[in-house]
Image: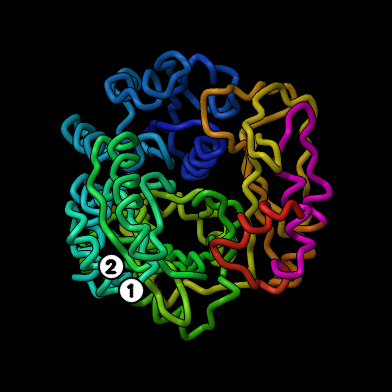
């Protein structure tokens, strides 16, 4: 087991990893920018190192400074959390060159899954169902028209190196294809420095289903069930739940088994999430995230297994603590992402939190690194906390969530709490009847 882990992140995920390390008796080091000197994870860590000014490129993305912090403090491993350097293959390679363990997959696996075209090829080879579309990058309009005609309109054009909805355009008919292709390539080049794009069939009313997987580093793999992340705004997840209200036990077992086998065949090490669009009983691979997900607590709630503990265990060479037959699903869990944003316009709302009170009681968990008097800096992602609620079934979970949202108080800034109070009372949400377009249509109506 590791002696000392450096946590290369900030906010609630840094605090989440820190707590797991303390439970395992591992010393902790956190890095921080000057803007985060008063952050909760900095206060609670055994050691902290300031690595630069507020801009991420000068601090949390500064590989040289993070490696130097490892060497100064004697950290023998780095947990990257999510975001920042968590899916940076170069970072993983550099740590390995310095005999520091990257708690995550190999640089090669990060590279494969970071390239959307190569990821799709790999998924297909591993037996994972994929969305019909191009086999590689599409550069010519003539080729794009041929592929679109073969798979049928509407089609979606996506950036190979992209994510978060950038470099993504839909063509509903042949007349739309030229401008969609040009716009997607232009956005991809500007956002990622790579204008390669590919084409897929555009599904009209799919759900976003993702499967939590783990590789043991020795050719074995398991799955921890699925999460439904269909409530999204601009391709960013807002509300996540496990298990999905759209799947039955047979579908859950089938897709989970496919993913676990694929991860084993790939020789993958650590946590990963295989993401799908799901429509009319069929799953279509869209991407794999080679890191811990923001929404991992809902999986922990229904399985009772600490996924960060598992990451650390696998990273240290100890393999997984559970076999597939040990993983049981209990009840239902929902996570709401609480952001420092206007609940309607989603404009960021940095500032000082004058009062912060979290809900409690059976089945309630709040992951947050903020507190009363904390000043939210304007430089980073607006996520300030996650409310995770667990119940014996979805009905009980929704009732408990409604109560927890009523108890949650954040004063001094605007947050997305009012949005969730609206959603929990909506009939479609109560019935689990929604898809990836539902939330944006709901917001557009101004309900």
Disc 1: which residue: 152
Above or below: residue 375 compared with residue 132: above
Residue drawn at 38 percent across, 65 percent down = 173
Label 1 SS? loop
User: In the image shown, does 129 or 270 lie closer to the viewer?
Assistant: 129
Tell me: 334 left or right of 183: right
Disc 2: which residue: 148
Q: Is residue 155 in view from this perspective?
A: yes
Residue drawn at 57 percent across, 51 percent down = 233
User: Few, some or many C-alpha atoms within 10 Å of disc 2 (few <14, some 14-19, many ≥20)?
Assistant: many
Q: Say which quarter of the image contains residue 19.
A: top right
Instruction: Name the spot of residue 107 as percent of width and height, x first.
Output: 21, 44
Instruction: Name the spot of residue 370 as percent of width and height, x first.
Output: 65, 31
Rendering colour mode: rainbow
Tell me: 162 left or right of 356: left
Question: Quadrant location of the C terminus?
Answer: bottom right
Q: Does the magenta-highlighted stretch encompass residue 426?
A: yes
Q: Does the magenta-highlighted stretch encompass residue 318?
A: no
Tell me: 296 left or right of 312: right
Which residues make up the magenta segment? 403-429
Above or below: residue 126 compared with residue 41: below
Are discs 2 and 1 less than 8 Å apart at CB? yes
Q: Is residue 105 in view from this perspective?
A: no
Residue located farthest toward the bottom when viewing the structure as drawn: 250
């Amino acid at each position: 087991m590791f002696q000392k882990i450096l946590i290369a992140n900030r906010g609630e995920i840094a605090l989440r990893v820190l707590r797991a390390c303390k439970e395992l008796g591992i010393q902790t080091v956190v890095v921080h920018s000057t803007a985060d000197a008063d952050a909760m994870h900095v206060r609670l860590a055994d050691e902290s190192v300031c690595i630069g000014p507020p801009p991420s490129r000068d601090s949390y993305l500064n590989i040289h400074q993070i490696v130097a912090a490892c060497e100064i403090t004697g950290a023998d491993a780095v947990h990257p959390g999510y975001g920042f350097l968590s899916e940076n293959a170069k970072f993983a390679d550099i740590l390995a060159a310095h005999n520091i363990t990257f708690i995550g997959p190999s640089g090669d696996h990060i590279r494969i899954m970071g390239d959307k075209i190569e990821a799709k090829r790999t998924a297909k080879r591993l037996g994972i169902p994929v969305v019909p579309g191009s086999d590689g990058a599409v550069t010519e309009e003539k080729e794009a028209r041929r592929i679109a005609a073969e798979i049928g309109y509407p089609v979606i054009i996506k950036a190979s190196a992209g994510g978060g909805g950038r470099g993504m355009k839909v063509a509903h008919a042949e007349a739309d294809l030229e401008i969609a292709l040009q716009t997607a390539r232009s956005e991809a080049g500007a956002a990622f420095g790579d204008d390669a794009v590919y084409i897929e069939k555009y599904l009209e009313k799919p759900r976003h289903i993702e499967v939590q997987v783990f590789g043991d580093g020795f050719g074995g793999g398991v799955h921890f069930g699925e999460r439904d992340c269909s409530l999204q705004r601009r391709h960013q997840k807002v509300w996540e739940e496990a298990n999905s209200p759209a799947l039955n036990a047979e579908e859950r077992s089938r897709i989970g088994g496919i993913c676990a086998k694929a991860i084993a065949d790939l020789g993958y090490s650590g946590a990963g999430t295989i993401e799908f669009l799901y429509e009319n009983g069929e799953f279509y691979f869209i991407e794999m995230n080679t890191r811990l997900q923001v929404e991992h607590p809902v999986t922990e709630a229904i399985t009772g297994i600490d996924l960060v503990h598992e990451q650390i265990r696998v990273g240290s060479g100890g393999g997984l603590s559970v076999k597939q037959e040990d993983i049981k699903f209990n009840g239902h869990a929902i996570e709401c992402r609480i952001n420092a944003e206007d609940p309607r316009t989603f404009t960021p709302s940095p500032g000082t939190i004058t009062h912060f009170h979290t809900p409690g009681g059976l089945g309630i968990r709040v992951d947050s690194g903020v507190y009363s008097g904390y000043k939210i800096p304007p430089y980073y992602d607006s996520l300030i906390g996650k409310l995770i609620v667990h119940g014996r079934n979805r009905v009980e979970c929704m009732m408990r969530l409604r109560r927890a949202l009523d108890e949650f108080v954040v004063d001094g800034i605007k947050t997305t709490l009012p949005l969730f109070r609206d959603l929990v009372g909506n009939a479609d949400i109560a019935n689990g009847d929604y898809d990836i377009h539902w939330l944006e249509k709901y917001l557009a109506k101004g309900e």
